[in-house]
Image (tube, coloured by chain):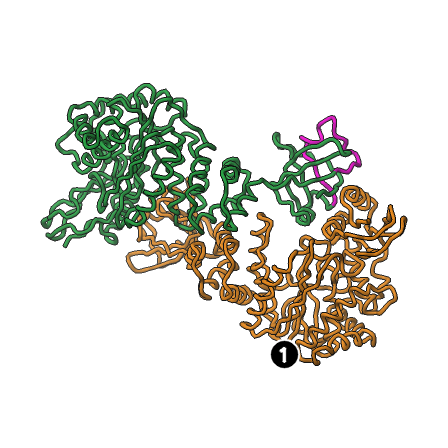
Chain colours: A orange, B green
Amino acid sequence: MSFFLKLKKLDFSTGNEPVVVINEKEAEFYGVIPGDRIQLTWNNKLKRIAEVRTTASKVKPGEIGLFKELWNKKDIQIKNDVVEVEIVSRPPSIQAIRKKLFGKKLDYQEIYSIIKDIVDDRLSEIETTYYVASSYLRDYTLDELYYTSKAVAETGEMLNLNVPAVDKHSVGGLPGNRTTMIVVPIVSSLGLYIPKTSSRAITSPSGTADTMEVLAPVTFSMSEIKKIVKKVHACMVWGGGVNLAPADDKIVRLTRPLGIEPYDKMIVSIMAKKVAMGVDYLVLDLPVGPTTKIPKNKFADEIEKKFIFLGKKFGMKIKVIRTPSYEPVGRGIGPALEARDVLRVLQQKDLRPIDLENKAVKLAGYLLELADYCKVGRGAKIAQRQLASGDADRQMKKIIEAQGGNPEIDSDEVALGALNYEIHAKKSGRVIFINNRAINEICVNLGAPTDKIAGIHMHVHYRDKVRVKDKLFTLYAQSQDRINLALKALEKNSIVEIK
Amino acid sequence: MSFFLKLKKLDFSTGNEPVVVINEKEAEFYGVIPGDRIQLTWNNKLKRIAEVRTTASKVKPGEIGLFKELWNKKDIQIKNDVVEVEIVSRPPSIQAIRKKLFGKKLDYQEIYSIIKDIVDDRLSEIETTYYVASSYLRDYTLDELYYTSKAVAETGEMLNLNVPAVDKHSVGGLPGNRTTMIVVPIVSSLGLYIPKTSSRAITSPSGTADTMEVLAPVTFSMSEIKKIVKKVHACMVWGGGVNLAPADDKIVRLTRPLGIEPYDKMIVSIMAKKVAMGVDYLVLDLPVGPTTKIPKNKFADEIEKKFIFLGKKFGMKIKVIRTPSYEPVGRGIGPALEARDVLRVLQQKDLRPIDLENKAVKLAGYLLELADYCKVGRGAKIAQRQLASGDADRQMKKIIEAQGGNPEIDSDEVALGALNYEIHAKKSGRVIFINNRAINEICVNLGAPTDKIAGIHMHVHYRDKVRVKDKLFTLYAQSQDRINLALKALEKNSIVEIK
C-alpha cells in the first residue's frame, strides 16, 4: 500500500545511495523504520528507490525531505509537488528469520539471503540477533547446517588452487598445542598442498597466527596467499587478513553477551572456512577434557557425526581424531615460547617437547593416509622420517622465507630478552591437576599475546612426580610490573596441583 | 576467577556509580564487556563494586583506570598499587534467558529477574532481544504467561483503590470503536469504579487517549488518578503518563523490526496493565475480521482460553466477547470526529451512530452482569436506560470536569474549523467491502492524530445500497495540502467498494 507526501528539498548529500527523510511520527504510522527502502513515484511514471531516515523536527508530518542526490536530477519536478511513497518490501531475509523463529525449516535460498544480508549490513543488529537466537533454540537440521556453511563460505572470498588441498584443524581451548606449525611443514615437504589459515587469540594467550607471526608476517591478501602456496605448497597465515567467511565474525560478536557458542555455530564456522579455502582432505582434532571446549565424549560424538555428514555434502574427506586432554601440549604458552617449542621440534633439539612432536606426527600421519599419500598405518612413520631427516625443517624455512620472515632463526633465539621468574614446588608429591584456564589467564596477566615474549614455560607434566623446590614453571614478561601481577594472581589461582 | 591489574588515576567523573576503565584487548581476554560489574579488592580486604568501560588507548593492557569517585576516597591507596579484579557474575537474568533459549521452563523468580533487569536497563538491547526471541519460538506455558504478566505488572506502578474495580478492553485494529468513552460513564453512573487507562495511537489515526484528549487532559500521575477515581468513580487517562507495565514498552519496541507481535506478548501486555490498575472484573472485546488483529476465530479461541486461565490466577473475573468486524464502529475516524460520535451518543442526538451506541450498551451490559450489579440478561437494558435518562451524559460531564476539561461542550462544537471534502459514489450498487486499513492510512495522510480535527466521517455502512452521486464519506483536514495528499492516496487505495 502506498501513501502520499509533499516534497521538500534538503541541502544534504550522502554522495552515495539516495536518502529521504520522513517525520518520525509519520514514519511510525506507516511502519517505516530508518534503513527501510521505499519507492518514490512522480506522476505515476518516474520511479526512484531511496533509503529512509527519520527526524523529529527537520521534516514536518505530511512532508518528505529529499537529499541532493534526488532533487539534483533534471528529470525530477520538485516545486509544490506530491510524491507517491511505497514501502519496498523488507529484505526477504526478514521473512526467512521470522520463519526460522517460528520453527520452520529453511531452504538454501532463504539461508543465503540471511547470510548475505548480514555480510552486506542490510540487517540490523537486532534483526541479526533474532536469527542467531533461533540457532540456540533448536539444533540445525543436517541440511540447514550444510546450507549455512555453504552460504557463509560463498559470501566471502574463496581460494581456488586447482589442485587437491589438505588441512588440519584443532578445536581450541587447549594451551600450547601448536601442532599446526609442525604438521604443515611435514606434509608440504612431501609435495601436498596445505593452505592453512589460523586465528589470532580471542580468549587465549596466543592463536596459531600470533605464534607464526614471531617467525614471519601472517597478513596477506588472497592473491598473495595463492602465490605463496603455489610456490612452496603451504602457507600459515591469519584468516582475519582476508575476507574469509565474514558473516561468521559478525555472528560471533552477537553470541558474546550470552557467553556460550552453540556447537552448531562452531561447526559452521570451521566448515565454512575450510570450504572457502578449497580443502579436500581434513583431519580434525577434537581435544576432549575438563577444561577444553568439549568436556564430554558424547558432545564429541555429535560433532563428529555432523562433520562427517558435511564432508560428504561438500566432497571433503574428513577424519576426526579425539585427544583426551588434561594439560598443555608442549611446554611453552605464549607466542614466542610456543614458537620456540615448534622450532625445537623441527630442528630436533634435545630440549624439544616430545608430547608436541608425537601429537603433530600422529596428525600429520593421519592426513597423509587420508589424502592417499600412503597406506593406512604408514603415515606416522613417514611423518617422523621427515622430521628426523631435516626435510620438515628445510620446508619450514622455505615457508618462513616465502612469507617474508628470517628463515635462519634458531630456536634458542626466539624467546630471548624477557624477564623471567621461576616457580618451585612447595611440597613433594605427584602432579594431579593442571589448570588450563588458570594458565591462559595468568599468561594474559603477563602480557600475552600483545607482548610476544610473555607467557609460561612448563617444567612438569600431568602425573609427574616432583620433590619440594623442583621447578614447576617459569613466568616470562617484559616488565617486573607484569611479573608482579602474575604473582598476585598466582596467590589466588593455582596452576599445578600436587598431592 | 580473578585477575590483577595496576591502578591508574583517571580524571573523569560520572557523579554517579563508580566506573573503571580496562583496555579493550585485555577486557576481551577476560570476557568482560562494557556494562559488566566487577569487584575490586585492595590488600585482600577493602572491596568496591564498579561498572566497566573499555578503551583502545586511554588505559594500557595490565592497567585499570579508576574514575574520580573511586580514587577520591581516603581509604583507597593508589600509588603503585595493584588491585584484584573479580567479575561479579553476570545478572542472574542472563542465566534465565539462556535457559529459556534452550527451551527450558522458567519459574517466577527467573522471569521476574529478566523483567526487572529490562526495566532497570541492566540488560542490553541484544540480551533483551534474545529473551524476546524465545517467545516467538514457542508459546509460553500457561504458568509462564501468568508469571510474566505478574512480573510486568509488579515492576511498574500499581493503583490500589481498596474497592472492587471493573474495566473493559477492546483489542485494537478497528477504526473508530470508541465504546470505552460510552461504557465508562454508563457503568460509573451506577456507582461502579472504573479506572480506565488507554493508549495513544501507534499505527492508527487515534487511540482512545487521543480522542478523550479532545475533551479533557489525559496525562496524570498515579496519585492524581487515584484522587479522580475516588471522586467520580472513573477516569479515562493515558496509560503512558504513568509508569504502567514499563517492561512492555521496551519489549514492544524490539518486536517492531520483525513486524509481528506474538499473541502471547499481546496477552501479557493487556493483563499486566489490568493487574497493575487493580481490576477485578474485565469485559474483553475481541474484534474478529479480515483487517483486524485477529483475523480468524481459531486464534480468538486460543486467546480466550489463556485470558480465562489468567483471570483465575489473578482472581479477576473475565468475560470475552467476540464481535465480527467488517467496518469501523461509529461514523468518525480521527480524534475529534470520534469524540463527536461519542458525545452524540451520550447526548442522545438524532445524528448519533447507532452501531456505536449498540456495541457500547452491549459491552456495558455484560460488565454490569459480570460484576453482579444485576442478573444475567438485564445488563443491556440498564445500560440503555442510563443513556436515555441522561445519567450517563451527566456522569461524562463529571469525569471531564474532574480531569480538567470543559464539561459543557456540545457534540456539534467538537469538530468545527476544518476544511472538508466529500467523496461521492461513482456508480450505484451495494457496499460490499470497507477497507479498514485504507481508512487508517488515509486518516494519517490527513494529519491524524497530531491534528485532532483530521480524519474521515463515513456516510455509508457495509451492505448499504447506494446510488450514483450519494455521499460515501467526508475528508477533514486543517489544510488543502492535506486534502490533496489524501485525494492522491485515494486514487490508489479505495475505501468503499461498490458492486
When the figure is inspected, residue B166 is found, relative to residue B443, above or below; the finding is above
Res. B356 image quadrant = top left
Exactly how many numbered labels are in the figure? 1
Q: Is residue A37 visible?
A: yes
- Disc 1, SS: loop
Q: Is residue A417 left or right of residue B82?
A: right
Indicate whether residue B329 is drawn in magenta: no
Q: Nearer the viewer, residue A459 or B211?
A: A459
Q: Amino acid at mark 1?
A: Val
Q: Which residue is mark 1?
A: A163
Single out the residue that lies furthest toward the top.
B231
Neighbour tally class for label 1: few under 14, some 14-19, many 20 plus, Cα within 10 Å: few
Res. B358 image quadrant = top left
Q: Is residue B416 visible?
A: no
When the figure is inspected, residue A237 is found, relative to residue A487, above or below; the finding is below
The spot of residue B449 in percent (x, y) is 31, 38
The spot of residue B495 in percent (x, y) is 22, 49
Q: Chain of mark 1?
A: A
Q: Nearer the viewer, residue B21 or B43?
A: B43
Q: Nearer the viewer, residue B215 or A319?
A: A319
The spot of residue A29 in percent (x, y) is 35, 44
The spot of residue B427 in percent (x, y) is 12, 53
Indicate whether residue B75 is drawn in magenta: yes
Residue found at x 52% / y 37%: B109
Residue found at x 45% / y 45%: B254
Q: Is residue B303 left or right of residue A437?
A: left
Q: Which residues are magenta?
A: B62-83
When the figure is inspected, residue B328 is found, relative to residue B245, above or below; the finding is below
